[in-house]
Image: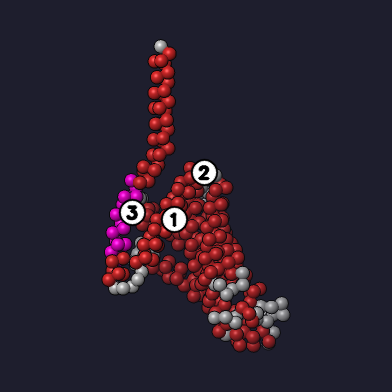
Amino acid sequence: MEIASGAATGLGLLKWEWEFDTEHLGWMVDFLKGMLKPLMALAVVLMAVALSYAQRLRLEREMLYAIFRAFLQLSVVGFVLQFIFNSQNIAWIVLAYLFMVSVAGYTAGQRAKHVPHGKYIAGASILAGTAVTLFLLVLLNVFPFTPRYIIPVAGMMVGNAMTVTGVTMKRLRDDIRTQMNLVETALALGATPCQATFQQVKRALVIALSPVIDNAKTVGLISLPGAMTGLIMGGASPIEAIQLQIVVMNMLIGASTVSSIMSTYLCWPGFFTKAYQLEAKVFSSE
């Protein structure tokens, strides 16, 4: 009886361990099954690699590295987002948002590398523009404050604001450098830094924001945007997809405008001395 009872207990433990392993490894099986189509889509990348080799472009290694890196990054992000969605913890939403802003600020600052403290200025500008926009969207009940909505929405805004902010900062510095004599003359006549660089600021903002505005003008006519395409492919009706895409375009314009304007204000202290003169070392290099 004791032997039979021990055997039954052992079998029960083995069965429990098998069920535990199956339950916890199920996500890995589902992930591997889901990766079959992305792996099949590598055929078009191999076509591009073959064409690069045939044309002697020497981009084959870079193409393969880019695809491998994209695969790795998106896989990690997918697991992280799955964890955040399941946890339903506000702290994880904030941390994910701040991480995106930090990476975006660093990237935009790299574009405007000659701007003093460019990475911090870009990060603060992106944070201000996207945070204000997110706050208004949540306040107006456009989106609920849940990971499934906030993180994708914040990601779209941060990515767009990153590009606009980087272009604004770089263009402003380059324009002031090109027209230093004009700016210095205005300063000598008693103009403030704001007044002396008004035209340069305006030009930088117009150039940076024009692609966002042009994209809003032609959305749906030339190509279907990513958010709208994803919803339609996921089974949503085109009407629902259009409604969401309108919200997306609105928030991108709002966040980009606030971020770009904020970056110009934050750039001024680094461009001028306390005596309201241009900082020569900022504009000495190309």
- What residue is rendered at 42% in x and 18% in y? 6
**Quadrant assignment, res 4:** top left
Q: Is residue 9 above or below residue 49?
A: above
- How far across and how far down the image is residue 97, in percent? 54, 55
The residue beneath circle 3 is 38
Give the alpha-carbon distance from disc 2 to disc 1, as whole Å: 23 Å
Query: For mark 3, does the 10 Å Cα neighbourhood hold few (<14), some (14 to 19), or many (20 or more) residues?
Result: few
In the picture provided, is 220 more to the left or to the right than 104? Answer: left
Q: Amino acid at mark 1?
A: Gln
Q: In the image, what residue occupies the spot 41% across and 11% down?
A: 1
Q: Considering depth in this image, is 284 or 56 the residue closer to the camera? A: 56
Check residue 73 in the rendering and tell me which mark sits there, or answer none: 1
Instruction: Decide: is 272 above or below 60.
Output: below
Badge 2, how many Cα within 10 Å: few under 14, some, many 20+? few
Q: Residues within 10 Å of mark 1 (few under 14, many from 20)?
A: few
> Given the image, on which type of amino acid does mark 2 rest?
Gln
Amino acid type, label 3: Pro
Provide the secondary structure element on which disc 2 rests.
Answer: loop
